[in-house]
Image (spheres, rainbow, N blue to C red):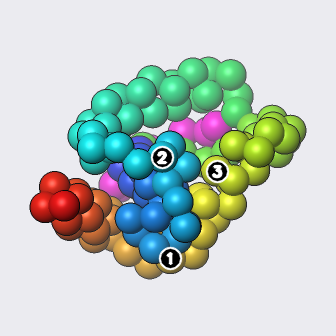
Amino acid sequence: MTLDRIVAYDFIAIYGRHFGIADSNLHGDNDYGFSELSTRRAVLQEALKTLVLDGLVKATRQSEGFCYKITETGYRFCHGQKTEYANTYRQLVKTTHKKYAEASEVELMTAISRKSAEALRR
């Protein structure tokens, strides 16, 4: 999975109500949620570097750029997180993937842009 797809899935999962995958947004409702996207990308890019160095994620160079995949160690760590937030987030990401697995990164970002424009009109 590319960084851009990870960012999009993360964003959609957190603001799931806007995308029809949840009854409420994991981080609640706020007027600035959609402005977080560029910041979240930078944070996730740095986090992926650390996760790769720690052996929790594997990075491979592909034609579309670097792709990331969780390792067995990363999977065990992830599923060792048992908080309500972690469980809800995991479920939302699974739901996001089911809904958008066939979408291109351009389509994902277009969906986010549309929802952002709708939110601004409210």
On the rendered structure, is 52 left or right of 104? right
Residue under circle 2?
28
Assess whether residue 25 is covered by the magenta stretch.
Answer: no
> Which of the two discs, 1 and 2, labels the residue nearer the N terminus?
2
Q: Which of marks 3 and 2 is nearer the N terminus?
A: 2
Whole-percent x, y for residue 108 in the image: 32, 65
Tell which tag, 3 or 2, sits nearer the viewer: 2
Q: Position of residue 110 (x, y in %)?
A: 22, 66
Question: For this view, does 51 lie left or right of residue 107?
Answer: right
At label 3, which amino acid type do we have?
Answer: Tyr
Disc 3 designates what residue? Answer: 89
- Which of these two is toward me, 61 or 113? 113
Q: What stretch is highlighted in magenta?
A: 57-65
The rendered magenta stretch, by its main secondary structure, is classed as strand
Neighbor class of circle 3 (other Cα within 10 Å; few <14, some 14-19, many 20+) is some
Residue 24 can be seen in this image = yes
The residue closer to the viewer here, 115 or 42, is 115
Q: What separation in Å lies between label 3 and label 1 (alpha carbons)? A: 15 Å
Residue 10: tell me if it is visible: no
Residue 40 at x, y percent in the picture: 38, 35
Which residue is tagged 1?
99
